[in-house]
Amino acid sequence: MPQVLSAVKALIEKDGKFLVVKMTVIDKELWDLPGGKVEFGESPYETLHREVKEETNLEVEINKTLGMFWFFRKKDGHQVVCNTFLCKPKHDNIDLTKNVTKESINEFRWVTKEEFLSNNFEVSHESLKELISLNYDKRQ
């Protein structure tokens, strides 16, 4: 039976742009924000720090909650609800070769809001683009 899972995502902003990662999900390449599933006993903040470090080798400072988006996993039908936080990097030494997660992260880019909202970035669910469109202002 499908379940609802809790996840956290980091919108990491630097110089008016934010970080997105391209992941291979099943047989499709999709763009997403760094982050992942909250493990039992872990706070959302602990999860965010752990997942961002695991995926990108970045350490971040959490500034505020940005909002939520969601998607349905194809492999099991679970709905994933992603609490998203606006963050600043403590450094900018991204290293995808240190990715210790199961996700296949192929690429990263620093993008503007306008670039990300274009048709050039396919996402798992339009609610991610809606969140960015409505809640992200680079002057935050």
Image (spheres, rainbow, N blue to C red):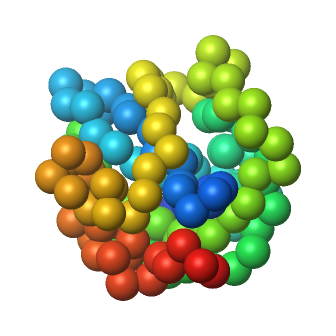
* Residue closest to the far left: 119
Q: Is residue 1 visible?
A: no
Query: Residue at position x 20%, y 31% from top?
Result: 28
The one of 120 and 4 positioned closer to us in this rendering? 120
**What is the quadrant of the C terminus in the image?**
bottom right
View extreme (top): residue: 97
Q: Is residue 65 left or right of residue 43?
A: left
Residue 46 position, x and y percent, is: 79, 58
Compared to residue 94, the image places residue 71 above or below, namely below
Q: How many marks?
A: 0
Q: Is residue 123 above or below residue 125?
A: above
Residue at 68 percent of width and 31 percent of height: 94
Depth check: 140 or 75 in front?
140
Check the image and name the residue furthest to the bottom.
Answer: 134
Q: Picture coordinates of residue 123 (x, y %)?
A: 26, 51
The location of residue 14, given as percent across then percent down, is: 65, 56
Examine the rendering and report whether any part of residue 114 can be seen. yes
Residue 124, compared with residue 135, is above or below; it is above
The residue at 33%/76% (across/down) is 133
Q: Quadrant of residue 126?
A: bottom left
Quadrant, the N terminus: bottom left
Q: Position of residue 54 (x, y in %)?
A: 69, 34
Say which residue appears at 63% left-offset and 70% top-offset.
Answer: 86
